[in-house]
C-alpha cells in the first residue's frame, strides 16, 4: 500500500510541476504515465529506473521528485565498484548535458543554477541510499553474531546446570539400584535411573546441536568478503600454500566465524580502514588471520572480548563475550585462537588442524 501511495505521490508532484511550466494535453498525460512506470520498476530495476529518470529530467527539465526517489534506490543497491563507476559516469554525463543546455538558453545568470540543482537532487540521495545500505549490512552481521553468542551461552548454561543435576540424579539412582530394596521399588528405581540417563543423553545431544549449529564453511568466505566490500570495507584477501580438507564441518565453520568476527570488529572499531584476510595453508594446519589498523582511540567496551583469550591483553582492560565464544568454537574443532591487539594493528589469528591424509573431511 505504501508503495502505491509513493508512486502516486511522485507522479502527481512531478506532473504538477510540469503543468505549472505550461505543459498540457496528451504530453502531460504521457509524462504522468512514464513517471508512474519508472516508480513502479524502481524496486526491481533501480539502475534502469535511475537512468530513465535522468532521461526524463533532460527532456522535460523537471522530474525532481523522481530523481530523488530513484537516486536513493540506486544508491541503496550499489554493490560493487563497477556499479559505482558506471553510476558516476552516467551522473557526470547528465550534469554535462544539463549544463550545456543551460548555457545555450537565454538568461546566462541562471546558467549554473540548473546543473547545481541537478547535482543536489541526485548526489545526496545516492549517498544517503549507499550509507543506509552499509548500515543495514553492519547491523545484519552484528545480529548474526549476537544470535550465535546467545546460542553458545545457552549451550554452556544447559551443560553446566542441567547436565550437572541430571548426572547427580543418575548417580544416586544407580546407587539405589544396587541397594537392598523390595522388588517393586527396585523396578521403580530402575525406571528412574533409565529416565535420568535418557534425559542426560538427550541434553548432551541438544547441547552438541547448539554448539555444532550448521552454518557456512570455507565456501562461504568469498560471499562474506563480498558483502563487506559491498558495504564499503576495503578487504584484501591473501592466500598461500596448497589447500587441504579440514576435519569436519565444525572446523570449516569455525574458520568462517573467525573471518566474520574479524571483519565485523574491523568495521565496528576501525571503519574505513583497510583489512587484510590471510588464509595460509601449512602442511598440517590452516592459519586464518584478520588484521586491521588499530583505532586511534580504543572503544569503551574493548574489542568484543579480546581480554583473556589465550593470553591476549585486551583493550582498556575489559572485554565482551564475542571472542570468548569464538575461542570455544575454535577449540572444539581442535584449534587455537590468538588475539593480538597492538598499538598500531589489531590481529586475530586462528590455527585449525587439517584432516589426516586419506580421512574424510568437509571443506
Image: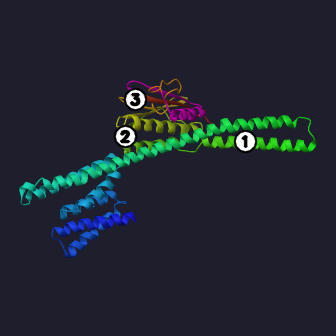
Crowdedness near tag 1: few (<14), some (14–19) or many (≥20) residues, C-alpha within 10 Å: some
Q: Is residue 201 left or right of residue 326?
A: right
Q: Residue at x 28, y 48 (%)?
A: 85
Q: What is the CA distance from the residue labelled 3 to the residue labelled 2?
A: 20 Å
Q: Nearer the viewer, mark 2 or mark 1?
A: 1
- Tag nearer the camera, 1 or 3: 3
Compared with 283, 361 (above or below) is below
SS category of the residue bearing label 1: helix
Q: Secondary structure at mark 3?
A: loop
Give the label on residue 201, or none: 1
Which quarter shows the N terminus?
Answer: bottom left
Mark 3 or mark 2, whichever is nearer to me:
3
Q: CA distance from mark 1 to mark 3?
A: 45 Å
User: Can the viewer see residue 119 in this picture?
Assistant: yes
**Residue 298: assigned label:** 3
Residue ID for mark 2:
233
Asked if the residue at tag 2 contacts the one at tag 3, i.e. Cβ–Cβ closer than 8 Å, the answer is no
Neighbours of disc 3 within 10 Å: few (<14), some (14-19), many (20+): some
**Inter-mark Cα distance, 2 to 1:** 45 Å
Q: Return the x and y of residue 66 as percentages of the image width and height.
A: 27, 61
Residue 153 is covered by the magenta coloring: no
Give the magenta part as a residue range: 318-344
Which image quadrant is residue 202 in?
top right
Amino acid at each position: 500500500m505504501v508503495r502505491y501511495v509513493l508512486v502516486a505521490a511522485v507522479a502527481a508532484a512531478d506532473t504538477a510541476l510540469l503543468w505549472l511550466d505550461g505543459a498540457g494535453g496528451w504530453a502531460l498525460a504521457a509524462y504522468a504515465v512514464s513517471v508512474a512506470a519508472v516508480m513502479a520498476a524502481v524496486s526491481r530495476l533501480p539502475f534502469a529506473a535511475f537512468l530513465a529518470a535522468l532521461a526524463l529530467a533532460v527532456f522535460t527539465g523537471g522530474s525532481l521528485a523522481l530523481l530523488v526517489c530513484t537516486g536513493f534506490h540506486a544508491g541503496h543497491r550499489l554493490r560493487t565498484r563497477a556499479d559505482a563507476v558506471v553510476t558516476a559516469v552516467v551522473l557526470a554525463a547528465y550534469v554535462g548535458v544539463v549544463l550545456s543546455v543551460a548555457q545555450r538558453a537565454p538568461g546566462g545568470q541562471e546558467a549554473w543554477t540548473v546543473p547545481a540543482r541537478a547535482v543536489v537532487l541526485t548526489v545526496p540521495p545516492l549517498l544517503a541510499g549507499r550509507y543506509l545500505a552499509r548500515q543495514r549490512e553492519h547491523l545484519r552481521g552484528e545480529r548474526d553474531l549476537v544470535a550465535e553468542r546467545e546460542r553458545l551461552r545457552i549451550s554452556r548454561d544447559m551443560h553446566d546446570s542441567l547436565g550437572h543435576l541430571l548426572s547427580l540424579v543418575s548417580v544416586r539412582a544407580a546407587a539405589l539400584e544396587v541397594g537392598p530394596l523390595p522388588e517393586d521399588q527396585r523396578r521403580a528405581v530402575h525406571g528412574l535411573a533409565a529416565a535420568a540417563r535418557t534425559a542426560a543423553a538427550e541434553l548432551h545431544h541438544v547441547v552438541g546441536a547448539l554448539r555444532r549449529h550448521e552454518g557456512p564453511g570455507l565456501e562461504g568466505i568469498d560471499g562474506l568478503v563480498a558483502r563487506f566490500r559491498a558495504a564499503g570495507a576495503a578487504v584484501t584477501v591473501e592466500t598461500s600454500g596448497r589447500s587441504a580438507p579440514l576435519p569436519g564441518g565444525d572446523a570449516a565453520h569455525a574458520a568462517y566465524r573467525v573471518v566474520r568476527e574479524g571483519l565485523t570488529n574491523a568495521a565496528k572499531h576501525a571503519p574505513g580502514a583497510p583489512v587484510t584476510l590471510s588464509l595460509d595453508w601449512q602442511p598440517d594446519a590452516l592459519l586464518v588471520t584478520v588484521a586491521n589498523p588499530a583505532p586511534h582511540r580504543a572503544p569503551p567496551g574493548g574489542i568484543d572480548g579480546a581480554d583473556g583469550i589465550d593470553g591476549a591483553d585486551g583493550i582498556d582492560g575489559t572485554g565482551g563475550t564475542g571472542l570468548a565464544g569464538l575461542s570455544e568454537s575454535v577449540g572444539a574443532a581442535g584449534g587455537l585462537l590468538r588475539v593480538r591487539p597492538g598499538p598500531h594493528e589489531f590481529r586475530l589469528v586462528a590455527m585449525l588442524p587439517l584432516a589426516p591424509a586419506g580421512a574424510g573431511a568437509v571443506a
